[in-house]
Image (tube, helix red, strand yellow):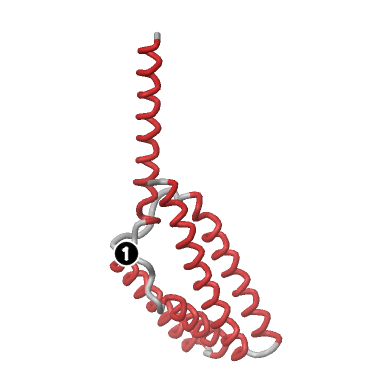
Amino acid sequence: METSRTHDDREREAALQQLQDIERAQAATWLDHPATPWWWAPYFAVWSGALVLSVGYLPGWGSALGNLALVAASGFLIGYHRRHRGTWPTGDIPRELHRPLWMLLVGAGVVMAAATAIGFLVSVWVSAVVTDVLAGLLVWRYERDYARAAERARRRLP
């Protein structure tokens, strides 16, 4: 009887280890990559301010071309980031990263609402400057929180 119990315990431990190995492999694209470069948050700040100016000041085709240029700049950034990381995150997100990702999405909505309100109530230029600062701070904070959360996930999934 004791031999059977020890064998069952070893099988259970092996199965648990396999499950942890699978979870670690799924989380790898979210956790194992170089840090983002120092200019990441300032890039988003300038991009966000430029978007406000493009939407707020450029008429007709000018706005369309300005927005197209901003989309191209986003495409460049995504391509750069994929080459820099060697991959793009896919699959299940480690639970430690849920909060930073949600905070980024909620923060982006808040920045967008603030940009719109300030643009209508004050001026587009003030809106662009405020958006520039808020977007830069949001991305900086997200990167910091993401790095901390990823470190917790790495400790949980050795």
Q: Residue at x 30, y 68 (%)?
A: 84
Disc 1 target residue:
85
Viewer-side residue, 89 vs 4: 4
Query: In the figure, is residue 15 to the left or right of 107?
Result: left
Viewer-side residue, 41 vs 56: 41
Q: Residue furthest top?
A: 1
Q: Residue at x 38, y 19 (%)?
A: 8
The x and y percentages for residue 135 are 54, 76
Residue type at mark 1: give it.
Arg
Q: Residue at x 34, y 46 (%)?
A: 25
Q: Residue furthest front?
A: 2
Viewer-side residue, 41 vs 153: 153
Q: Residue furthest right?
A: 121
The x and y percentages for residue 27 are 39, 50
Query: In the figure, is residue 113 to the left or right of 147?
Result: right
Q: Secondary structure at mark 1?
A: helix
The x and y percentages for residue 66 are 45, 85
Query: In the figure, is residue 86 to the left or right of 111?
Result: left
Identify whether 132 is placed above or below 74. below
The x and y percentages for residue 118 are 67, 83
